[in-house]
Amino acid sequence: GENVEQHPSTLSVQEGDSAVIKCTYSDSASNYFPWYKQELGKRPQLIIDIRSNVGEKKDQRIAVTLNKTAKHFSLHITETQPEDSAVYFCAAPLYNNNDMRFGAGTRLTVKP
Amino acid sequence: EAGVTQSPTHLIKTRGQQATLRCSPISGHTSVYWYQQALGLGLQFLLWYDEGEERNRGNFPPRFSGRQFPNYSSELNVNALELEDSALYLCASSLGQGRGEQFFGPGTRLTVL
């Protein structure tokens, strides 16, 4: 996306390890940051999101952290499983939450 | 509640032809977004419609256009098709009103020969 940078582009981990994907954004007024998972041949699906009034949000094995000062947010997956293998996209608002831009995606491979 | 639907699932055209892709949003959603995804890569923003109006467009030539109907469904039209237009075209809808969450349809796979 034009205002969202996502790293790394590919990530390979062993089953049970943790995976971290990081995104940076440019608009300091941004206040909503979702993460999407796209499995092979399927549509992107929202897996977790965070709003700027909190610094961290967890949902079982996944968590998102937000650093508004540094303008970056990260997806953390713990105890990875082969079914976590997918492409993950972050997104951030361009002008407002109705107008989102997506990062370039991270292809995560979890090796059994 | 039905999700976002798109038609057709697959579309094969030849260079120079025109393609029309359709999207029906989730009931109650007023915003519709179109994205191009080539070769399983990133989601390139194409167009955003809300309440029948085009609100923003991405860095695509004018031969990519669309519209939103009074029932909030949307069409994406691609004129003068080029080989590099071959991609998965994804539609998403949202409630708008600053909530942010977008829900994606299954996509239309466009192949230009």
Image (cartoon, rainbow, N blue to C red):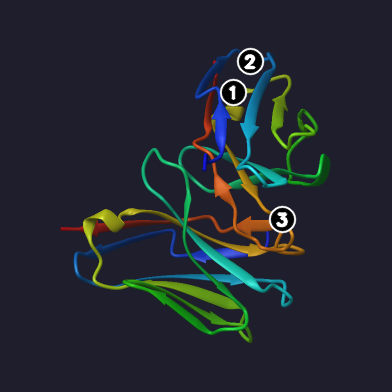
Residue B57 placement (x, y as % from top left): 77, 45
Name the one closer to the observer, B98 or B60: B98
Residue B113 placement (x, y as % from top left): 54, 15
Image quadrant in which the C terminus of chain A is located: bottom left
Name the one closer to the observer, B73 or A63: B73
- Same chain for mark 2 and mark 1? The answer is yes
Give the left or right position of residue A106, taking residue B36 as reference. left
Residue A101 placement (x, y as % from top left): 64, 57
Q: As shown in the figure, which amino acid type bears the numbered disc 2?
A: Arg
Image quadrant in which the N terminus of chain A is located: bottom right
Residue at the extreme right: B53
Q: Chain of mark 2?
A: B
Quickly name the residue at label 2: B15
A85 over A24 or under it: above or below:
above
Between discs 2 and 3, the one toward the N terminus: 2
Secondary structure under badge 1?
A: helix
Q: Is residue A34 visible?
A: yes
